[in-house]
Structures are given as C-alpha cells and as structure tokens.
Amino acid sequence: MSIVTLTTDFGYSDSYAGVMKGVMLKINRELEFVDITHAISPHDIQQAAYVLYSAFSYFPEGAIHLCVVDPGVGSNRRPIAFEAGGYYFAGPDNGVFTKVIEKLGPSFIYEITNPDFINRSVSNTFHGRDIFAPTAAWIARGGFAMNALGPQIVDPTLIDLPKQTQSAPNLIEGRIIYIDHFGNAVTNITSGLIEKLQKELGAEGVEIEFPSGVIKGILKNYSESPGGAAICATIGSQDTLEFFVRSGSASATYGLSVNDDVDVRFY
Amino acid sequence: MSIVTLTTDFGYSDSYAGVMKGVMLKINRELEFVDITHAISPHDIQQAAYVLYSAFSYFPEGAIHLCVVDPGVGSNRRPIAFEAGGYYFAGPDNGVFTKVIEKLGPSFIYEITNPDFINRSVSNTFHGRDIFAPTAAWIARGGFAMNALGPQIVDPTLIDLPKQTQSAPNLIEGRIIYIDHFGNAVTNITSGLIEKLQKELGAEGVEIEFPSGVIKGILKNYSESPGGAAICATIGSQDTLEFFVRSGSASATYGLSVNDDVDVRFY
Amino acid sequence: MSIVTLTTDFGYSDSYAGVMKGVMLKINRELEFVDITHAISPHDIQQAAYVLYSAFSYFPEGAIHLCVVDPGVGSNRRPIAFEAGGYYFAGPDNGVFTKVIEKLGPSFIYEITNPDFINRSVSNTFHGRDIFAPTAAWIARGGFAMNALGPQIVDPTLIDLPKQTQSAPNLIEGRIIYIDHFGNAVTNITSGLIEKLQKELGAEGVEIEFPSGVIKGILKNYSESPGGAAICATIGSQDTLEFFVRSGSASATYGLSVNDDVDVRFY
C-alpha cells in the first residue's frame, strides 16, 4: 500500500475529493489515503503552503503528497510533480510547495505533460481529478523515472512568505502566519531563535507585542494560563511561538489575523 | 480490498458515519472506505442524487456506493440494493438513486428484507447502521446472487429532476441544480448541447440569462474572468455550464439558488 | 490491518489529525483509520465521552480507539492506555473514557511513560502526535503486554455524567446529553426503563416535559411526526429518548441544550 495524502480547498460538501480518490483507485488499488485537510480557505495558496509543510514530514518515506489549491486551473500555470526528501509531491506550480522546497532544498521538478500519466480528457476546471490524481496514482505504481512525466522546470513558482528577523540584539520581528481551528495564532518565530537570544543575552524576561496588546512571558503549556479570556503565548507543536486563549479563540477575542506583526523583545 | 463509498447527510460531528464503518468492518475486514461526503443538506434527496451521480463512475468497477439520506427511515419506505454498470448501490428507495438509474438504465433492484444481510436488531431511526452498512459489507464479501437480498421491485422511486430543453432553435432552457463549496452554481445545461447548437447555427455569440442578470460568452476557464466580483460562465467538471465569481461566491454574490431558471440564447 | 479510530476536537481545517495518522503509519503500515469525528466542541470532555461511547462497540474486537480532547495537554494530567472489552483505548486521563469504563467495568489502566512507545521528543501542546498516536501504532503492532507502557493507575479520572432516575413510581427524570448534527436532542432516558415502567403501570399514556414545553407520546419513527416545526419524541439509535423536529432542528427551534432537564411521566 502506498500512502497518498490530500491537501485541498475543495471542502467537505462536494464530491471533488472523493472523485480524486476514485480516479486514483482506478489506476492503482494499493493506495491508502490520508486527508490532511480539504478546508484550506478557497484559493489561499499561502495557507496551503503552511498546512502542507506542517504535515508532510510526519509521514513515512515514499508518501505522495497531493496539494490541490488551484485558482489558476486551466490557465497556463503548470502542473508539476517532484521527489524531495524521500517524498513525492504533485500539484499546481503556484507556490503551494514553497515551504516544502525551502525546507528540502533544490530538487528536480517536472511539468506533467506526458499523456500516459493523466486522464485521456482533461477539463479546464478540475486538474485535481484529471492530472494530479492520475499522476499520483502512477507514481505510487512506480516503474518509471520522474523525468518521464515531462520536461524539467528550473523556475518553480515560490511565493514570498514572511520570515522572522532579528532586527536588534534583543528583538525578533515576526508575523502571525496561521490561525488554527482553536483560534490559536501561530507565528513564524521559532523556539530555536528565542532560546538562542535568551541564552546569549542572559535575559531576565521577554515581552511579546502584537497589534492589540503586549504580554510578558512564554508559558510552558496551555494549562499555565491564568484562564478565562487572557491571551497567552506558548511554543506550539511546530516549535514556533503561538498565542492562545484558554477557554476561547485568541484570534476572535483579540482580533488577530494572518500577517499581523509580532515583536519578541528581551529585557 | 473492496471499495465502499459513503454519501450521507450525517455531517461530521456525530459518530454516525464512523459507526457505519465499524459495522461494515465487523462483517468484512477487507474494505477500503471513501467518503464522498457526509455534508448533504439534511434530508435533501435531490442534492444527494446529484452528488452521488457526479462521483460514482470515477470508481473502479465493483465499488459499492452507499447513499444514506433517509428522512423516511423507519417508515414504509423500502431499503434497496442493486447492481448497475458494474457498481453496487445500497440505500433508501426515496429517489437518491434517480440520476444513477437514469444514466445506467434499467436494472434489477431488490428490497432488502433477508435478515441474513442486516443487523439482528433494526432500529427505526438509523438504517444506515442497521440495514445499509451490513448489506454493503455482505455484498463486498460476495458469494451470493443479489436476489438473495429480498424481492425484486419494479417501481423504484424516481424523483422529478429538472432537465434542459431546447425550446427554440437558438434557445436552451435549464436550471441551476447544484451550488458547490466555492459558491459555483452548476446548471443542467450540457456542453454537448451548447456545442451542437453553436455549430448548427453558426452562432456569433451566446447570451446567458439568470434571475439576477445576463452575461455574454462562456469562458474557457476560471482565470479568464476579468476578476473581482464579476459573474462569469464556464464549462464545469461535469461538462455542464456553471456560473462562478473569480474571488468569491457566485451563489452568495448574485443570489443564485438551486432550481433557478437559466436560459442560453445564441445570436 | 489493525483498525484505529480517532475522536478529537481538532476540527477539519488543520493538519493535526493527518499528522497523527502519519506518525502512526511511520511506526506501523498495517493500519486502517476510521475517523469517528474531529468535530468535538473544543475541550468538551463530556461530549467526547458520549460520542466515543456511542461508537466504540460497533467496531471489531481489537480496534484501537484514540480519543484526543485534551485541554490539559502538557500539564500533569496523565496520558493513559488500556484494554477493555476486547478493545484498546488511548488518550488523556481527563474523563473522556468515563462512559466506556462505566460500561465495560474495571480494567487495568496504564499511564504511558515508557519512552519506547512515544516520540523521542514530546511537545507540551500536541500529545496526540507525540504520545497517543505512537502508543496506538505500537499497540497495533503488538508483541508486548500493556503493562510495558508504564505504571498501572487505579484512580482514572471519571467525570460526573448525569444519570436518569426514577424519582416516583410514574416518573423518570433525565437530561439532554447530546445535540446531534440534525438538531435532535438526545436524552439519557433509556427505552428499557420507559418500557419497564409502562408495562408495570399499565400506563395509558406518557407525557414528556422539557424546559420549553410538554408533549404527549413517543413516536415510532421520524415519519410519524405531524410535520413542520412540531417537536416530537422518539427512541433514537442509542435506544434512548430523543427530541426531533421533522423539517428542522429541535435544538434550535425549541432552545434545547445539553443538561436541560427532561421528565417522562406516565398516566
């Protein structure tokens, strides 16, 4: 059984994700599907890039990660597939793989053009079904080199994702990059950099500023919150700083959004 | 491994769909489940008929399609199962299979009455668990003819679904039959009929009228939209005309609903 | 293939549930996942206890039931696993297993402390990924006794769940314990006790009182409703009394909530 994961903005009410699975099973019965999510906000490439990145490496090597958030379907945006870090990836060349490529380094990326690996008839509105699903199912069957899929491309589309910066000896500037289901606001500020500065500076404390307030300290876990609607910070499951509210949504209660500035200041 | 797909209105918050899978696995461990959706609007038989139809044929032959949108559960509506087009179907006899039966033609349909293929105890509120899931799991195990399930029925319930009509040499009248997760409004007007008329008439252009407006032309894909909130038409993944808005919901922005009239006029 | 079910409050938009599956597949490829639900209300232990209870026994023996509704993650609440009734369970020791333990009776429950069965690095915010998923995957691989996981605990956390009481010869007092996706309001009043009293009393009729009204009679199924927005009672799929509205939500229409009092009075 090969593992195929799916990350899409198709939602859960239509047959789109199920149809992709059917198409794959017609080509290859030895597949085990894992839905990462089908609830990426419609057309939100940045969100897809983050969610895929947060998940891909937890799977066994050989897993095939399909990502179909594809506002440019049917246009001249290229369908691509590649192998990197022991995993396979397939989806539109629109930036959804930005964080994966940044993490795993350069790899050989191919435009999917070979008709042997896609549906005989290709619609202009659903390449998940007509291109990416068949390609994934064929990759899982194996028996060919990835360059059989089509020409190599050397300029994959990468989107500009905000990065943390150390803008003063005692200051890290970052951003909120994701709001999760609990309303936790995940930043791009890593525990690694926080710990490094704290150690270097022998800092007494840390102050975290966000658009609607300032808090002090980073809690060890959610339970250390004083409770109620107090906004707190902790290190989340991706080893980055995140805001939370014990019994509610930090995002809703404090108006936090993706791309909000966050400053971490040691004193 | 046999494939069992599920199309229900059970939603994602309760244990109902999971329970159906457990019941099936107790009878037959060699099953691979694919959720088409559990988010059919509660009791919406017409929507279920469309969603099932849009998905079933993408699966390998032998797949068993369970459809449980069943407002009449526990009443005298019949539980049915049948084989058609190489697939198996099980669910309530309330019209959910209308489009499948129309497409695949007449077949032998059986009322599920044989206690060997259903739970020992049958509730009046959850035949998905007590009748349809066990029947599907037994069908997947095989070793019996479908008429072992119960008496053949010759009058399956078919619901009256709107059909496109060519009501003048240059006019197709149809309806919106589905609103998807993106707010795209799918009609029952086929690309086949559109292309046929366009060719026959040597038409210069096409005008599409819907309750809240008129637009000209059918775009090749979503990216050809002028953008923003402009409503546009394209041919969707079921080869039918659909309305979309590039960066939003056509349904919400233009107040489009299922059963709205749509006219396609060539000039 | 071993069966692993998942009951969480992770929702469907993040990668959390998918990541848990990836972690398990890295340890054990022979797993079949069944999502019970990921839509438990955030941190709602009582709801999780009910949903897990409503589902677990429908699975084949040997199934491993993961339940991760874990507001105390990273604190001193214990991670536990146990075998009971032929099933395995893993999750936080916060009461999510209350109804399972009540039903299956005492069993040997272990705190998961052995580093061989958990991730090398354990975060303070995601034990689903770092402790419960690995433990479940190792249990599925087998080859060790459950007490290898860690020390036995004899005081598992049990939450106080409302119970039906017969407070007069002709009166059952209970509570609404769950609102489902359809808005049906499920009570903890069993059909067993209702039938017993009805028989003992030779009762002519039954009257059901809830905060916003009183109705007479228990219908055989949903179709017996007079229709529209009338609130009715029937015996639901867990063999307990439930309120429903034929073409809508009983909960929304009549303001019914979990923990509302319900009286069943025979006359």
Image: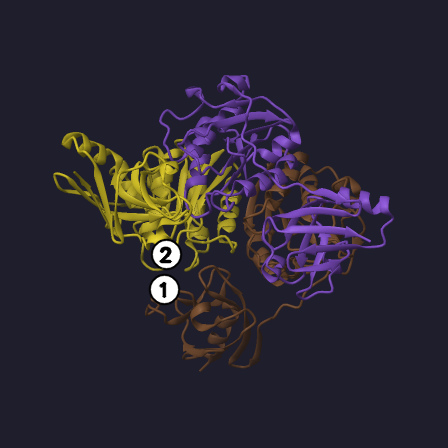
Chain colours: A purple, B yellow, C brown
| Numbered badge on residue A93 | none
Q: For mark 1, what is the residue?
A: C247
Q: Position of residue B156 (x, y in %)?
A: 26, 48
Q: Position of residue B193 (x, y in %)?
A: 21, 35
Residue marked by disc 2: B43
Tell me where residue C250 appears, x and y as whole percent: 43, 68
Give above or below for A153 relative to B111: above
For the point 60% across and 52% down, the residue is C8
Image quadrant in which you'd find residue C168 = bottom right
Can the viewer see residue B66? yes
Using the image as rendered, state which of residue C250 and residue C62 is in the foreground: C250
Image marks 1 and 2: residues in contact by CB distance under 8 Å: yes
Total residue callouts? 2
**Residue sticking out furthest to the left:** B169
Please say if B77 is above or below C190: above
Q: Above or below — where is C171 with respect to B265?
A: below
Q: Chain of mark 1?
A: C
Rate crowding at label 2 as few (under 14), some (14 to 19) or many (20 or more) other CA atoms within 10 Å: many
Residue C30 visible in the shown view: no
Describe the element under mark 1 as helix, strand or loop: loop
Task: Using the image, name the chain to which the residue with label 2 belongs.
Answer: B
